[in-house]
Image (tube, rainbow, N blue to C red):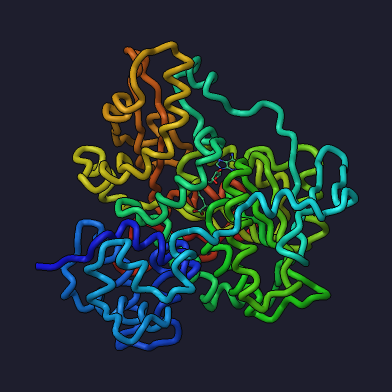
Amino acid sequence: MPILNDWTRKIVALKILFNADGFPALVDEVFGDAVFKEEEFYREKLTENMHTWYDGVPTRTPRAIKLFEYIAYRLACDESVTAQMLMRSTFDEFINLLPKARRAEAQGKNEILPQSIFMDDDVPVTNLEKTDNSIRVRLKRLNTDIFPMYVFEDGDAPSVRQAAVGGAMDQRVFYQHPDSAVFWESIVTAQHYPTYDKCKYSLDKLWRSQIFLDEMAHNPPDAIVMLGGGGAFGKDVSTISAFLGTGSYTEANPLRYALFDISPWMLRRSLARLAAHWTQTDWGDKVAIELFTGDLMKLNSGARKRELRHGAKFVVWSLTGGTIGNISEAEFFRSLNLVSVPGDTLVLSASVKLRSTVQKAEEEPDDESTSRYLSPSVKSLLRNPLRDLIHELGSRKSVSSVMDALKTRFENGDLEGVTNVPDSHSMIMTADIDGFPCDVFNHTSYCPDALVAFALTKGWSHIDTVYPDHFSPDFAQFYFKKD
Ligand SMILES: C[S@@+](CC[C@H](N)C(=O)[O-])C[C@H]1O[C@@H](n2cnc3c(N)ncnc32)[C@H](O)[C@@H]1O
């Protein structure tokens, strides 16, 4: 039976052509305003299915046919080009089925290079300003617009050497490599890692919810700060669109949208993609985008509080993508509380587990959980820091052999000291380098009521919890307000 050929490469090309960062965005862009019976269900189910197409979906599958029919139509392919041809073709044949004008783009040849944004010779020196202990760099975007970027000096940076001494790798290290943003993008669309899509879906749902719109009407925030916010271009676009859609922001009173991340590489990637997208929107000066590099665990250090709030009465703080599951929750809230004020809101995305399933998951971890964390795309992000760690320890082992022997175990997270939230369930990944065991990564899933109770002890009251859809009770957006 014929199957969808070369999906791994075609999906990369389609993401570029439709300027989409994941399956939901691609489906939205491809179908546009087209309406289907049981609309929401259809699109959700389709994006769920697309994660499995890497294994080869039969080209007779109706949802796949419909998607490729629309792709041919939206890309204005020649009338002779059918969905079957687009599906069965090899990647090179697929490129030739596209209109000539789109072929180079589909192969990534026209991508705007981040460097062209960061190192624009035309930007006059006066656009570099030094304030207290931050440097504001004005970056020229395309020909006319300007993004400011702030760089903070953070003191001690996490290092591989620390991991070699302490036997545990700090997750911040993974995003310090220049290739990390590209690896992260491959995780986002990977078969075994649907978390990004679930997060984006539930975030979209939250922004459209009545409870959020009511909050906006009463206390319109002046700024959104996306903490650990690099590498989430699709969430940036849908968040900015949703906020501007409320009509609360004008050119005289713009929305400040700040991406705050420890990794300049992740920020750079977001910036390149946002800049490219900008020209297709009517956002104009209704939103002011700012980029900050720094550690979200030290939000109050230096001039940060002033620069982040920038006189804003209310700020929406956001930590998406399940990043809370990789860090100390107590430390995060302590840091956040130093810069937030009563009336601010917080959107926290987290993996969740029903209390009844936690113990079972620890005793019998299912294959899906294990393969998700040991999948090639997730391992690609670990490869460079692991190579450095092996070198630091003076081992002769190859990085591949260490990667192949990575082990995951599932534990009650608070008993293991991995998390501060009771009843949590943590995955701990360990590498063994010549008998030196090193915890390289951990990720915690929470019982929703325990996370809500924990936030309350830190002064944040629960407003709402939004799940992506009825298929995915394992991920949620928690919406809080500071007391
Ligand atoms: C799992 S990725 C999530 C990316 C994306 N924001 C999302 O929502 O899908 C984690 C991001 O958090 C950033 N990060 C991790 N620890 C951080 C820290 N301590 N301070 C600032 N950023 C951090 C990483 O650089 C990376 O961009």
Report the front residue among 122 and 238: 122
Residue at left offset 21%, top offset 78%: 62
- At x 79%, y 75%, the residue is 251
* Residue 439 coordinates in the image, percent (x, y): 40, 26
Residue 199 position by quadrant: bottom left
Where the C terminus falls, by quadrant? bottom right
- Relative horizontal placement of residue 165, taking residue 53 as reference (left or right): right
Residue 196 figure quarter: bottom left
Q: Quadrant of residue 426?
A: top left
Answer with left or right where residue 57 lies relative to residue 325: left
Q: Up-down: is 252 above or below 476? A: below
x 36%, y 67%: residue:
95
The x and y percentages for residue 19 are 50, 67
Counting from the top left corner in percent of width and height, residue 434 is at 33, 13
Task: Name the spot of residue 207 as percent of width and height, x first.
Answer: 54, 71
Q: Quadrant of the N terminus?
A: bottom left
What residue occupies the far left of the structure in this picture?
A: 1
Q: Residue at x 42, y 82 (%)?
A: 76
